[in-house]
Image (cartoon, coloured by chain):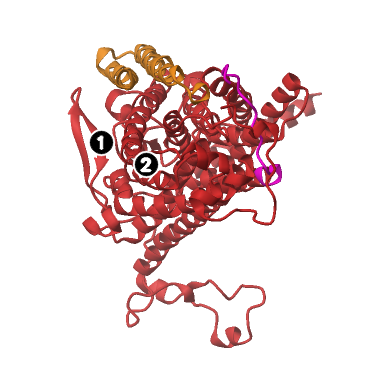
Amino acid sequence: MIALGALVTFLGFLISIFSLSLTTSPYGRLAIAIVGILVSLFGIIGILNRYYLKNPIWRR
Amino acid sequence: MKQSVILLTLLLCSSFTALPQGAASANAAAPAPTAITDTEVKNIAGPSADARAKGDPDGSLTGTVSDVSVADAKKGLTVSDIANQVGQNKIAVNFVWTLVTGFLVMFMQAGFAIVETGLCRAKNANHTMMMNFMVYGVGMLAYWLIGFAVQFGGYGANASLGGTGVLNKEFGITLFGKSFGLFGQGGFFLMQNHSYDVMVMVLFLFQMVFMDTALTIVTGSAAERWKYSAFIVSSFVMGAFTYPLFGNWAWGGGWLMNLGANFGLGHGYSDFAGSGVVHAVGGITALAVAFIVGPRIGKYTRSGRPVAMPGHDLLVVLTGCFILAFGWFGFNPGSTLGASGNGSLRIGSIAVNTMLAGMAGSFGALLYMWLRYGKPDASMTGNGLLAGLVAITAPSGFVNPVAAVIIGLVAGVLVCFSVEFVERVMKVDDPVGAISVHGTNGIWGVISVGLFADGKSNYGGSWNGVNGSVTGLFYGDPGQLAAQLIGVATLIGFVFTFSFVLNLAVDAVMGQRVSAKTELEGLDLPEMGALCYPEFEIRSGSSMEPAV
């Protein structure tokens, strides 16, 4: 789960990089970069954070 | 009537005849410039020996032609001597500016130290203070050995600091047909590759104190449960690799700053003084470490409700905020790397923008907390000031004062929302709010360049190799915002992952968190061997009772 979260987070970075080759439009690159940011945030908050909340210290 | 018409006509004719004369005199060819010769220069008289022997109470005899350095005493003063002195004076002014502002940034370490220590409990004060004290040494060592070369090894020469351009080794790859600079390879130990150079020394000092600011941010989020030995290793790794890598991409000749030159995206990723490079890198790494070390015992009830754990000394917290605000006058204006030439006279605008944003941030947080909770909260107001300062750091050199106030005000409110989100929704324990102040508002600062940069700045006619001035979306350039957002994606997607993996490795090797027994006792005695306040009995309030 940790590896998946890290990979999804990194994938968002790659998506934003590939905006440079997918289109030459600044608005297009802007939109793809936003998608990349959202994917990374999902990796951090949606996967990694949820993993750590499954067995938190306050329930041990 | 007839006489008036004649008089008026005469007046009009005289004015028309005056214009061509004026125009003619303007149009007359200007005399060709006469070259100044060495002979003429040699004959310029300085103050006489008799006059100087009487002292110089008004300063009119000091700083004259007699003080210009002469290369050959036999030849005497030459035009070449004067030209060299002009160049030397420009570089000397810029050296002094950069060094003195660097000294101010160094002093920010004291501000961070007492803000963090004041926001922590008394039983951890020694440990927290020692982390902030030694992060200076650990970071400097890592940066001197490895980090500076990684970040600036391919920097080249700098117009404000002069120099021979010895930092000329950048490793890159080719991607999408363009060169992607990844990291530098020159300047290890400030000796390798001829880096024992006066310009390099100035650059190192200034950049080192910026790097240390990023490292110290992490100590805040992991305070009260971070093993001291793990803090040292983690900080070393951050100073040697994490910070310099992103720093190379943004400032050292790497791919992010060249998004404009290579892909037509504005002026490439533009971060004047480091909202992204310093603060977001620090805040995002702080989040990664906070995930790994976990929340403090007692921070959350069994149902996951957060419990307030107030700091032990608000007085030093707010004093520390003032120290930081003072040091920020070095952080932002100093990033011109000079006070002479190449648009450096904008240092006044940058300093004012910095002040205004900090002020607006404190108001934003104060008003939000007052309206929402009925009281003006001291620690959040201090964090609001810091949030405004963090947010203005990237755009400070590119925006006008109104934009600075808007950016700061948004930052002050944003930090409050972010603290609540991190603590209540994500349930990540951050004793000092480092993730929200530096991470969230560092990112806001990066984005605000892409929105508010007004195209009025001029730092030598170009920025990041693209002619013209940095201009944001509101002033007509969407490409700049795209470049900034790619920078944000790099911070969140790459820097977080890189920091997270490195710190997982540290955790696997040596463990990052102290034992529960140590944490409950307080880190001062078990970890540091001495209490910060040995003459006072530390009282445990209900908020410090462990929930487990």
Task: Name the chain under label 1.
Answer: B
| Disc number placed over residue B182 in the picture, else none | 1
How many residues crowd mark 1 within 10 Å: few (<14), some (14–19), many (20+)?
many
Of all chains in the rendering, the one displayed in red is B
- For image coordinates 24% across by 16% down, the residue present is A21
Of circles 1 and 2, which is in front? 2
Going by the numbered disc 2, the residue's amino acid type is: Met
Q: Position of residue B449 (x, y in %)?
A: 48, 28
How many residues crowd mark 2 within 10 Å: few (<14), some (14–19), many (20+)?
many
The foreground one among B120 and B48 is B120
Q: Main secondary structure of the magenta part?
A: loop
Residue B202 placement, left or right of B366: left
> Residue B150: which quarter of the image?
top left
**Could you tell me if the residues under marks 1 and 2 are in contact, i.e. CB atoms within 8 Å?**
no
- Residue interval drawn in magenta: B302-317
> Does residue B32 appear in this view?
no
Q: Kindly give the residue lying farthest to the right in the view shown.
A: B1
> Residue B500: which quarter of the image?
top left
Q: Position of residue B342 (x, y in %)?
A: 44, 45
Is residue B279 magenta-colored? Answer: no
Circle 2 residue: B238
* Real-space Cα separation, disc 1 to disc 2, in angstroms: 17 Å
Q: Position of residue B436 (x, y in %)?
A: 54, 28
The foreground one among B332 and A34 is A34
Identify the element where label 1 is drawn. strand
Going by the numbered disc 1, the residue's amino acid type is: Leu
Query: What shade has chain A been given?
Result: orange
